[in-house]
């Protein structure tokens, strides 16, 4: 596959210290959250729609770590930019960790989130409240412009699956996820509240801390 390098003006990068980072995701919910969560980095965040089209990679990994690394490497080598990727998903204990890395494809790639949530709720129909425990996981990988992964961060948010979808905030499975200790779903929380509890919020804090050590800033 042809590679191209996109290095002009403030997108210029060195192989040692990132001056800008490509947020390598096509998921608008993740982009919105990272724009907030990574503000403390005070670094230019480049989005995929600012670059010439790059086809999505096939996520062939069996773990969040594998897929986060795969996506970061893939986009870095095609953009010539420092690239961060998030691989995340919902793991339900009673379903042995499903949908897990397949969260985005659960029930088929074309299934809507209403359909995916309905599928989850149907599979948990005969469970008691204590059998509905679950967690959201986020793994972030940062690759340098050569495609070498230089940093990994991760965050987990424990909780449980609600009886029915509630709320319209957030994205994906947010309306059925109750973070531990709360009786409101992520779908009923605003961005700030979700991020103070979420897997991606925790992974981002670790990411920022590791970036600071890494760049010496
Ligand atoms: P990219 O690969 O382009 O980043 P994606 O949506 O395909 O986009 P993933 O492969 O990591 O990303 O799939 C993650 C899925 O897990 C996502 O589509 C949601 O369904 C779910 N998910 C992850 N984080 C979530 C969150 O904070 N709230 C709700 N659902 C979430």
Image: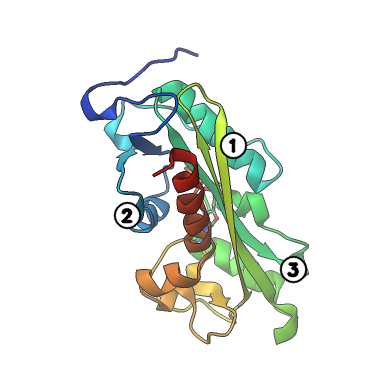
Q: Position of residue 176 (x, y in %)?
A: 54, 73
Q: Position of residue 189 (x, y in %)?
A: 40, 77
Q: Residue at x 64, y 47 (%)?
A: 64
Which one is in front in this view, the residue at disc 3 or the one at disc 1? 1
Q: Residue at x 31, y 29 (%)?
A: 51
Where's the C terminus, which quadrant?
A: top left
Q: Helix, strand, or loop for circle 2?
A: helix
Q: Helix, strand, or loop for circle 1?
A: helix
Residue 33 in which image quadrant: bottom left
Q: Residue 63 vs residue 44: left or right? A: right
Q: Position of residue 2 (x, y in %)?
A: 45, 12
Q: Which mark is residue 93?
A: 3
Q: Residue furthest top?
A: 2
Answer above or below: position of 36 versus 61.
below
Which one is in front in this view, the residue at disc 1 or the one at disc 2? 2
| Residue on which disc 1 sits | 69
């Amino acid at each position: 596959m042809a590679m191209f390098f996109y290095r002009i003006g403030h997108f210029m990068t060195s192989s040692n210290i990132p001056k800008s980072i490509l947020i390598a995701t096509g998921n608008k919910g993740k982009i919105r959250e990272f724009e907030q969560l990574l503000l403390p980095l005070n670094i230019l965040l480049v989005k995929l729609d600012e670059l010439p089209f790059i086809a999505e990679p096939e996520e062939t990994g069996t773990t969040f770590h594998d897929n986060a690394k795969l996506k970061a490497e893939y986009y870095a080598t095609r953009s010539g930019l420092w690239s961060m990727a998030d691989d995340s998903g919902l793991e339900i204990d009673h379903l042995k960790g499903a949908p897990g890395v397949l969260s985005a494809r659960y029930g088929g790639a074309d299934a809507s989130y209403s359909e995916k949530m309905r599928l989850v709720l149907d599979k948990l129909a005969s469970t008691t409240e204590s059998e509905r425990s679950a967690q959201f996981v986020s793994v972030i990988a940062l690759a340098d412009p050569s495609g070498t992964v230089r940093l990994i961060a991760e965050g987990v948010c424990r909780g449980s699956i609600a009886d029915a979808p509630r709320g319209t905030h957030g994205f994906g499975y947010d309306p059925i996820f109750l973070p531990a200790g709360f009786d409101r779903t992520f779908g009923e929380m605003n961005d700030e509240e979700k991020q103070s509890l979420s897997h991606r919020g925790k992974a981002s804090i670790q990411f920022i801390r590791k970036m600071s050590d890494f760049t010496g800033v």
